[in-house]
Amino acid sequence: MKKVAFICVHNSCRSQIAEALGKHFGKDIFKSYSAGTELKPQINQDAVRLMKEIYNIDMEETQYSKLYNDIEEPDLLISMGCNVACPVLDKDFYANWKLEDPTGKSDEEFKKIIFKIEENIKELIKELS
């Protein structure tokens, strides 16, 4: 089973959502991880709240902010999108999903990003199946 790592700088929002949705929808196809090049003290609380509301997934129960070096060596790296600076890693990205960071935006904007991540996860499942 392939290991897929979703990467963004802070590993607190988009990459955490992708990890959770990867585990939710793709658990039979790939192992999901998320990581960043910097740590935040907690997962974005709007992401936590909306993921519970939409999917009944409690990200704080099974996930935490972690660095790229703290996860298993992935087979595929997926960038969530680089707003300021892309993380530089020792492996090429399989894809860049070019997602805007919804931090500080309305629930509607947040949900657009969540649903786009879901769509991308389902497309990745097709690619890897």
Image (cartoon, helix red, strand yellow):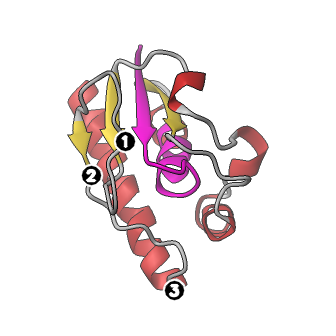
Three-letter code for the amino acid on which mark 1 is drawn: Pro
Structural crowding at the residue carrying mark 1, measured as other residues with C-alpha within 10 Å and reported as few (<14), some (14–19) or many (≥20): some
Q: The C terminus lies in which quarter of the figure? A: top left
Q: Earlier in the sequence, mark 3 or mark 1?
A: 1
Structural crowding at the residue carrying mark 3, measured as other residues with C-alpha within 10 Å and reported as few (<14), some (14–19) or many (≥20): few
Q: Are marks 2 and 3 in contact (CB under 8 Å)?
A: no
Q: Check disc 2 and report the residue beneath it.
A: 97
- Residue pushed farthest right? 61
Q: Check disc 1 and report the residue beneath it.
A: 87
* Residue drawn at point x = 65 percent, y = 43 percent: 65
Whether residue 8 is situated above or below residue 48 in the rendered picture: above
Whether residue 121 is situated above or below residue 56 in the rendered picture: above
Q: Give residue 116's position: percent from left, percent from top.
A: 34, 62
**Left or right: 53, with 103 as reference point:** right
Three-letter code for the amino acid on which mark 3 is drawn: Ser
- Find out whether residue 19 is within the magenta segment: yes
Start-end of magenta stretch: 1-22
* Residue drawn at point x = 32 percent, y = 47 percent: 86
Q: Are marks 2 and 1 in contact (CB under 8 Å)?
A: no
* Residue drawn at point x = 33 percent, y = 22 percent: 90
Mark in the foreground, 2 or 1 = 1
